[in-house]
Image (cartoon, rainbow, N blue to C red):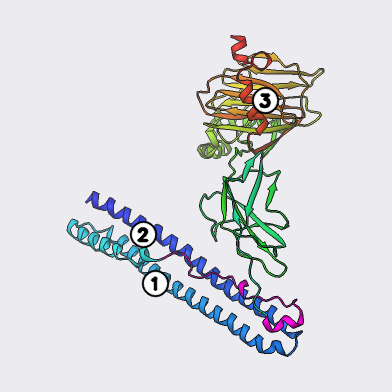
Amino acid sequence: MDAQKEALQRIVSTLANKNDEIQNFIDTLKHTLKGVQVNSSNVIAELDEEFDGMYSILDEMKESMTNSIKQEQAHKSQELQNQLSQCSNALENSEELLEYAARSMDIKDPEEFSKAARQIKDRVTMASAFRLSLKPKVSDNMTHLMVDFSQERQMLQALKFLPVPKAPEIDPVECLVADNTVTIVWRMPEEDNKIDHFVLEYRKTNFDGLPRVKDETCWEVIDYIKGTEYTLSGLKFDSKYMNFRVRACNKAVAGEYSDPVTLETKALVFNLDSTSSHLNLKVEDSYVEWDPTGGKGQENKIKGKENKGRSGTPSPKRTSVSSRSPLIRGSRDRFTGESYTVLGDTAIESGQHYWEVRAQKDCKSYSVGVAYKNLGKFDQLGKTNTSWCIHVNNWLQTTFAAKHNNKAKALDVPVPDRIGVYCDFHGGQLSFYNASSKQLLHTFKTKFTQPLLPGFMVWCGGLALSTGLQVPSAVKMLQKSENGLSGSASSLTNVTQ
């Protein structure tokens, strides 16, 4: 019976997934049907406007063209209504079958359950839901029925609907994704000298399949592109993929969209974990600032609560925090003492990643690096064997050093305005760069044995971080050559041991 239950559960799950597909397809059909009606009305309205300014010879043509549009609308509407009806019936039958299956799961008698399971299996096998074509038979586009009334008067008797430009073809091989920039390249299936410009649309998504009607952001539009390629720069890659589509336009009408192309735009995106930060740090997503008054009042309150708790009176505050602690990322204690530290909220367990940090001009002291999750609440970045960083000290005089395991290596380079951090988890490399010039500042070489968290220390100032960045091409090239270098770029671990 357990095996039958498991098999039935798989069948039910498959049917439920199919129901979701059908429901999504129904939404698509309704959207397409609405588009047919709206676009048909728009085309007829434009047709009326043009005909009002024409001579009587056009009146005879107007009725014929209007009929063509209405016939096309009727044909498409009928096709879509038929599909909509079929899908609705199939979905209704599937939902009834799901209800029956759900009731059958509660049957205790093995014989009755086996009988019900066989019936459900037979009905699922014959279910119409699996014989449906989940693709609209017609589109909502009516632009092939538009006309160009800018022709000269002697040509009106031979007037026909203006040919619609064919859909361009995006070439994924020629498209380029690098340095948070995407270049899209397309071509026309055949030469068309009447094309005036192209329209490119794009949007971010976490789905690797075709774009969906629901659960997607709106398309961003770039209009009046004269060439057959376009470059989007300065993007934040905060989604796994981006969808792209393009269409051609002549003076009067836009053609169909190209088949959408999905390009991978994955990069490390994280914020600062305020639940782990020192009480003297004010944390807001991607910004941390030293707050000399932030910790004292809160620490006194906590101590007061603890003292009350020790005297036998339970602390409501401590009870509340304790009950929520499993929800806190990592369930770790806040940094305290002189460890003015905050960690990132996303662990690095594989791959190559890059992010940048900018310090306030008047920041007195700060560190940028990575650490294992078990970094102690009193520990400072670079002073343990579980953390690596570069440290800037602007108090009295400026010092710049790479730190690990409480050992420091002075860096004889100017402190940059922005620091780029490159982490190759499996390659065991942590490199720091001048983010503007891509000059290598220092590289740690080791073997990471635990997940890493980005780490930041700040005193008397603030740090702003930028994530969603790909590893820059210049950094990739420098990493290849840097693997064979020594000296200032060598591992602090190797030098000091």
Q: Are marks 3 and 1 in contact (CB under 8 Å)?
A: no
Using the image, determine if residue 31 lies above or below residue 6. Answer: below
Q: Which residues are magenta?
A: 133-158
The x and y percentages for residue 209 are: 51, 52
Q: Amino acid at mark 1?
A: Asn
Give the residue number, with chain letter if any, for mark 1. Answer: 89
Using the image, determine if residue 460 lies above or below residue 61. Answer: above
Residue 186 visible in image: yes
Q: In terms of sequence position, does the residue under pointer 3 or pointer 2 come before the other?
A: 2
The x and y percentages for residue 211 are: 55, 56
Q: Are marks 3 and 2 in contact (CB under 8 Å)?
A: no
The x and y percentages for residue 425 are: 55, 27
Q: Residue at x 76, y 26 (%)?
A: 416
Q: Residues within 10 Å of mark 2 (few under 14, many from 20)?
A: many
Q: Residue at x 55, y 68 (%)?
A: 31
In screen coordinates, is 202 left or right of 79? right
Q: Amino acid at mark 3?
A: Phe
Give the residue number, with chain letter if any, for mark 3. Answer: 432
Residue 43 is drawn in which quadrant? Answer: bottom right
Residue placed furthest toward the left: 111
Residue 381 visible in image: no
Q: Residue at x 63, y 53 (%)?
A: 186
Q: Which mark is residue 15?
A: 2
How far is the residue under mark 3 from the one under mark 1?
61 Å
